[in-house]
Amino acid sequence: MSLPRVATNEEWLAARTELLADEKALTRARDALNTRRRELPMVEIGKGYVFEGPDGTVSLADLFDGRRQLIVQHFMFDPSWDEGCPSCTAASDEISDGLLAHLHARETTFVVVSRAPLAKIERYKKSRGWTFPWYSSFGRDFNYDFHVTLDASVAPVMWNFRDAAELERTGAGWMLEGSSEQPGYSMFLRDGDRIFHTYSMYARGTEQLGGSYYFLDMTALGRQENWEEPKGRADPARGAVPNFLD
């Protein structure tokens, strides 16, 4: 791996300033994309999904834990495996109690769902020292309906919003063979007793997730920060107070 070239401070400053313009353009483009994501239509969930957790059988509504939004990480863990997917494991190592607390402050719950039986999930979770909620969808439709378990003998295959014909055309026909587990995230919104699917992301898109703001940017309600100007202060950048409840 080659190292960057050595430059003078003036040369570095010129190059850094040029890069800053591109970084600002990317930030503006990302903000616009996040707005479009929040404006996506949503689909009401009509099926009564259930999962197995440490306290027994729970519904999709129960996963919200009383909050308004739900983020589900689709963790690759086939029932025949003894351990979870290494890449999913690396991502889950970064799910801290602090990140969960920040999401909870925005009325958003984070859970992990896998198709492996609960006993395997609990054993693996303990071995990693994880504290986030993790549920099993073993023997149920959830993974198939959200296209993270692909098996044409069970349900029509779709991956990253490409149906079987498009997967064949793009050289991913192997996904139509046998059964496979795939990664992803799905977001849900609760309005009273009604639950809506607002967004899902798969493939390389999942790599953009990191801190709590990145997760919130995938949700229908976003970061929930309407900046209000305190009395006597005209500059929000120096003294604004975010209103997280509006």
Image: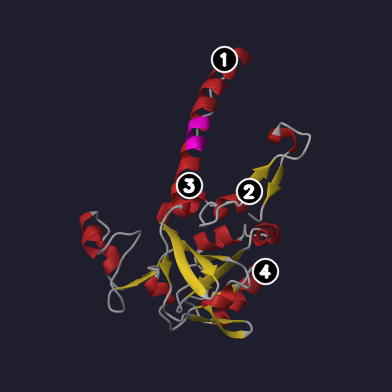
Q: Amino acid at mark 2?
A: Glu
Q: Which labelled disc corresponds to residue 11?
A: 1
Q: What is the number of callouts on the image?
A: 4
Q: Could you say whether the residue bearing mark 3 is in a helix, strand or loop? A: helix
Q: Which residue is mark 3?
A: 35
Q: Could you say whether the residue bearing mark 1 is in a helix, strand or loop? A: helix
Q: Residue at coordinates 24% horizontally, 64% vertically from top-left?
A: 164
Q: Amino acid at mark 4?
A: Thr
Q: Amino acid at mark 1?
A: Glu
Nearer the viewer's eye, disc 3 or disc 4?
3
Residue 91, how many percent across, how many down?
Answer: 56, 58
Q: Earlier in the sequence, mark 2 or mark 4?
A: 4
Residue 179, how many percent across, how many down?
Answer: 34, 73
User: 119 left or right of 234?
Assistant: left
Q: Earlier in the sequence, mark 2 or mark 1?
A: 1
Q: Which labelled disc corresponds to residue 131?
A: 4
